């Protein structure tokens, strides 16, 4: 019988299953996203990307994906699951680390949540670039985003809840298109 330590510390099977290049590529992609986010928020001097924590987040993500694929007998997971499981592990491992005090202490306290929130928000609107919303729709969308950010900061979350929030948003998009026809 495997002990809990060997299950969570031995990632060799993941390297065999996904390949070092796939895992390294995901790590490099997320690392660059972290750096871009910190730069866009002017937080580069107060925060750093902890490479060990980011690698654990990536490996934990791939570990979950492996279990999902085996359980459901599938070869690939959809992009909503990718976003939900990546987000969960980034929130859980918190790879963005505060290294200096700042006037923005309230922002720094939730820097990982803000990072994940910005990723999810960008994912939600990626196909809607250039769309101009009516004032009422814009208010509803911003309310949804405020609620999402609140949940990331203060509520319990898991990958399935994050997936459901994204799916709920996507269902609302479909519903809205039906009204416009």
Image (cartoon, rainbow, N blue to C red):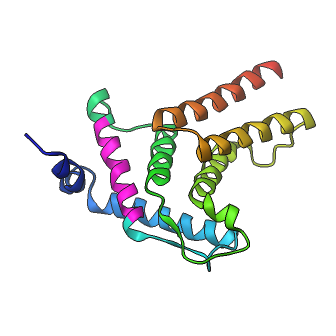
User: Vertically, is 126 above or below 45?
Assistant: above
Relative placement, left or right, of 103 versus 60 is: right
Q: Specify the farthest residue to the bottom.
A: 45
Quadrant of residue 57 within the rendered picture: bottom left
Count numbered badges in the picture: 0
Q: Determine whether 96 is above or below 67 in the image.
A: below
Q: Nearer the viewer, residue 149 or 138?
A: 149
Query: Can see residue 181?
Result: no
Overall secondary structure of the magenta stretch? helix
- Coordinates of residue 113 in the picture (x, y in percent): 59, 53
**Residue found at x 65% / y 73%:** 43
> Which residue is pictured at 52% across the width and 38% down the height?
156
Q: Is residue 49 visible?
A: yes
Name above or below for residue 171 compared with residue 44: above
Tell me: 125 left or right of 60.
right
- Image quarter where the N terminus lies is top left
Q: Quadrant of residue 144?
A: top right
- Residue furthest out toward the left: 1
- Residue sitting at x 16%, y 51%: 6
Q: Residue furthest right?
A: 135
**In the image, residue 42 lies at what x, y percent?**
70, 73
* Relative image position of residue 23 (x, y in whole percent): 34, 59
| 104 is within the stretch colored magenta | no
Residue range highlighted in magenta: 53-67
Residue appearing at x 43%, y 56% in the figure? 93
Provide residue 167's location: percent of width, then percent of height.
58, 30
């Amino acid at each position: 019988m495997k002990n809990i330590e060997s299950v969570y510390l031995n990632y060799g099977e993941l390297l065999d299953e996904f390949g070092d290049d796939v895992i390294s590529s995901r790590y490099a992609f997320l690392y660059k996203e972290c750096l871009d986010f910190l730069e866009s928020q002017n937080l580069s001097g107060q925060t750093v990307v902890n490479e060990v924590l980011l690698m654990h987040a990536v490996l934990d993500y791939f570990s979950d994906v492996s279990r999902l694929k085996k359980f459901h007998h599938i070869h690939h997971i959809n992009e909503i699951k990718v976003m939900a499981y990546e987000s969960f592990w980034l929130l859980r491992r918190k790879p963005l680390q505060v290294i200096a005090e700042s006037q923005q202490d309230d922002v720094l306290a939730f820097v990982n949540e803000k990072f994940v929130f910005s990723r999810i928000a960008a994912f939600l609107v990626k196909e809607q670039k250039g769309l101009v919303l009516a004032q009422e729709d814009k208010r509803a969308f911003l309310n949804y985003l405020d609620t999402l950010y609140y949940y990331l900061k203060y509520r319990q979350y898991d990958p399935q809840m994050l997936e459901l929030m994204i799916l709920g948003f996507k269902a609302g998009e479909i519903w809205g298109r039906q009204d416009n026809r």
